[in-house]
Image (cartoon, rainbow, N blue to C red):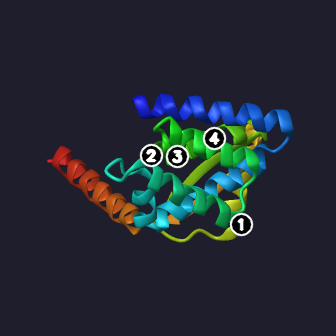
Amino acid sequence: MIGLRIARRYARALLTIGKEDGQAETYKEELAGVVKLLEEQEELEMAISNPLYDAESRKKVLKLVVERLGLSKVMTSFLFLCFDKGRIQYLKDIYTYYEKLTDELANIVRADLVSAVRLPEESIARIRTALSEKTGKEVRMEVSVDPALGSVRTQLMSLKESLQRSENI
């Protein structure tokens, strides 16, 4: 709960700056890159956020990361602010909320489409268009296949047939 409040506060602050200087999308891309790097490199994430290591050493590691990624001055300042305030461990949550805020700003809505089998591109496009017309926003969909959905459907159909047979007796 506290993490969510922190994420909202920091994401909103970064968005305010992004709106003022017109760089909201740039900051989103930079923050996404940092979060992705930390997710892929757990040791690096621990070296930056683990309070068991002394703060000065952790800050040096963060400085190296910022330099190697060539981040903007605003993003650099933002990351060091998060570090100095003990909020660096909330970076992924901050990014998630920031992405939602920038999507709203750009009139974008995200959707997850999960099906039991791979859907044809035409079907996906029709669903995207219908959602876009319904919401009045650009729809960005993540499409995935979960074969377990098919087996759940089969189980439900079997249960339905079983119930219908028992009613007829």
Q: Are discs 2 and 3 less than 8 Å apart at CB?
A: yes
Q: In the rendering, at what x and y percent does residue 12 appear? A: 65, 31
Query: Which residue position holds label 1?
Result: 122
Q: Which residue is mark 3?
A: 91
Of residue 18 and residue 97, the one placed in the foreground of this image is 18
Q: Secondary structure at mark 1?
A: helix
Of 41 and 138, the residue lying toward us: 41
Say what secondary structure mark 3 lies in. Answer: helix
**Residue 89 disc label:** 2
Q: Nearer the viewer, mark 2 or mark 1?
A: 2
Which residue is at 68% across, 69% downward?
A: 121
Tell me if mark 1 has few (under 14), some (14-19) or many (20+) residues whose alpha carbon lies within 10 angstroms of its own: few
**How far, Cα to Cα, is label 3 from label 1?**
37 Å
Q: Residues within 10 Å of mark 3 (few under 14, many from 20)?
A: many
What mark, if any, has residue 98 been given in the picture? 4
Asked if residue 106 is positioned above or below residue 157 in the image, the reply reads above
Which amino acid type corresponds to the residue marked 2 in the rendered image? Gln
Mark toward the viewer: 2 or 4: 2
Q: Earlier in the sequence, mark 2 or mark 4?
A: 2
